[in-house]
Amino acid sequence: MIKAFNFRSAGKTMVCITLLMTLILVLAGCGGGADQGKANQDPGTPAAGKNTEVSKANPLVVDKEAKTVKVYTEVNGKYFVEPTRHGIVFKDGSNGNKSILKAYANQNDFYNALIEINAKPGNNLQLTSTGVPVEGDKLNVTVTWAGANKELPFGEIVTDSTNRPFDIRFGGNQQNAKDKNTGCILCLDSCPVGITSNAAHPTKDFDSGKARFYGNKDVLPQDGTPVIVTFKVQ
């Protein structure tokens, strides 16, 4: 009687233990699968097609939500001492070594980037235009670099002999930009080829000697320093 009773009790105990172990294994398997799925995800990877880190290798970044275009450039110290009408030019354009800032993004991609953030081009200038200010959406243009610790208005990195406030506009000029291939992204007086330019000075102000522009050596970092330029529709 005693032996039979112990056998039945042991059997019931074994069944309970088996069920409990099975339940633990099932729960562990579910939890392990979820953890493994998380482990395979890279939280630092941006969404497909959206790399928001601007750099030499990724020199043009469009943020449609913020409505900004960022361009990677480098300081050209030559224009601390020589005048130029070129603010930002693609390094491989025909004017690639004539600007205060050398861009690593080309002018045609830059034009398309402004269209992506719904900027409207003026397209009011002809190659023969003289004394005509550029039209198009007004752009807020700022710059920064390692150690600057803030965004500076573009006008602060350029000295203008007339001291006029900058008025950067999306001139457009897409076909001229392609045909001429100067690489001009931002010109310091109104320009029929540059994608953006300065309405504060009408066309030919630099050529006629009415204005002279230099990189501001008291503000800009040294030659070759990376500078990030941000364009936003004002």
Image (cartoon, helix red, strand yellow):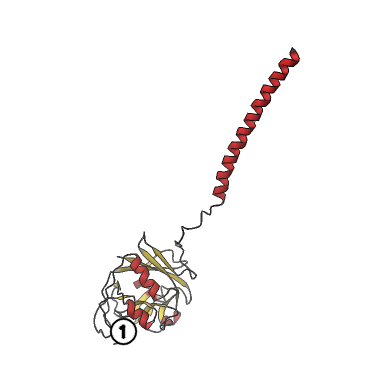
Residue 154 placement (x, y as % from top left): 36, 71
Residue 109 to residue 24: above or below:
below
Q: Is residue 141 visible?
A: no
What is the quadrant of the C terminus in the image? bottom left
x, y (%) of residue 19?
63, 29
219 and 78: which one is in front?
Answer: 78
Residue positioned 60% across, 39% down in the render? 28
**Residue 90 falls in which quadrant of the image?**
bottom left
Pick the front one: 88 or 43 = 43
Position of 230 relative to 45 (above/below): below
Position of 222 with respect to 210 (left or right) is right
| Drawn side of residue 114 relative to residue 228, left or right | left
The residue identified by callout 1 is: 206
The image shows residue 30 at horizontal and vertical percentages of 57, 40
Kindly identify the residue that appears in the image at 57 percent across and 44 percent down. Answer: 33
User: Could you tell me which quadrant the N terminus lies in?
Assistant: top right
- Does dot 1 land on a helix, a strand or a loop? loop
Q: Is residue 225 visible?
A: yes
Q: Is residue 114 above or below residue 9?
A: below
- How packed mark 1 is, by other alpha carbons closer than 10 Å (few <14, some 14-19, many 20 or more), is some
Percent coordinates x, y for residue 8 in the rendering = 69, 19
Front-most of 18 and 205? 18
Identify the image quadrant of residue 6. top right
Q: Amino acid at mark 1?
A: Phe
- In which quarter of the view is residue 167 placed? bottom left
**Which residue occupies 54% across, 48% down?**
38
